[in-house]
Image (cartoon, grey):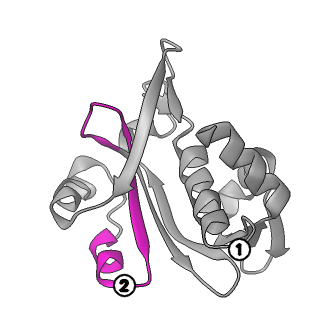
Amino acid sequence: MALIHRNSGEIYATDYGQVHQTELKKVNRLNGWNGFDWASYLKNENCFLYKLRVKGDPSIQGLICMEPMEGWVEVRLAESAPWNIGSKEQFFVGVGSHLFALACRKSFELGFEGFVAFHAKSQLIGYYQKTFGAMVIDRRTRRMVINTAHADILVQTYFD
C-alpha cells in the first residue's frame, strides 16, 4: 500500500490498524475533521474501525468504519484527514481509494466475494463510479455497491 504526495509525486508506504479511543481525541472539528462521532462506532462490537497512516508517522490520514452484514461489508463511514481534501495544498491523494480497498479486502476475508455497499453523498456518485467501479442500486437513497470484479481490482491495486 502506498500514498502519493500531491506536490512532490513521492510515494509513501502506508499501513493500517484498528483505531483506539485515545487516537480519536484529535479527530474533531477543532482539528478540521467533519465532527463525525467515530467513538460511537468503537462501542458497536459489530463494527471494524480502521485508520490509514504513512509508515513511521502516527498521523491518521483517513478513517473507515465497516460492518459485516449477511453477504457483504457495509461501509458506515469513511473520511480523509482534512489536509488530504480538495485544495492545492492537499498532502496525499488516494486516501479514499485505500479505505475502500480495505473494505473490499475485509469482504474477501469474510467470504463475501468482495461485495461492499454504502450510501454516497450525491456529489460523489460519479467519483465512486469512475474510481471504484461502484454501481448505483438505488438512486433515490444514493445506495451503491462494489462487486467482486471491481473489488478485486481495488485490492490488487492497493495490497499487492
The location of residue 126, given as percent across then percent down, is 77, 52
> In this rendering, would 59 be left or right of 68?
left
102 or 85: nearer the eye? Answer: 102
Q: Which residue carries the number 1 mark?
A: 112
Q: Which residue carries the number 2 mark?
A: 45
| Dot 2 alpha-carbon crowd within 10 angstroms: few under 14, some 14 to 19, many 20 or more | few
Residues in magenta, as a range: 37-60
Q: Is residue 159 above or below residue 36?
A: above
Q: Which mark is residue 5?
A: none
34 or 3: nearer the eye? Answer: 3
Question: Disc 2 and disc 1: Cα gap in Å?
Answer: 19 Å
Residue 120 seen in this snapshot: no
The location of residue 157, given as percent across then percent down, is 68, 38
Name which residue lies at 20% across and 56% down.
23
Label 1 sits on what residue type? Phe
> In this rendering, would 117 be left or right of 27?
right
Q: Secondary structure at mark 2?
A: loop
Name which residue lies at 42% across and 25% down.
89
Q: Quadrant of the C terminus?
A: top right
2 or 1: mark nearer the eye: 1
The location of residue 52, given as percent across then percent down, is 41, 47
Label 2 sits on what residue type? Glu
Residue 53 lies in the magenta stretch: yes
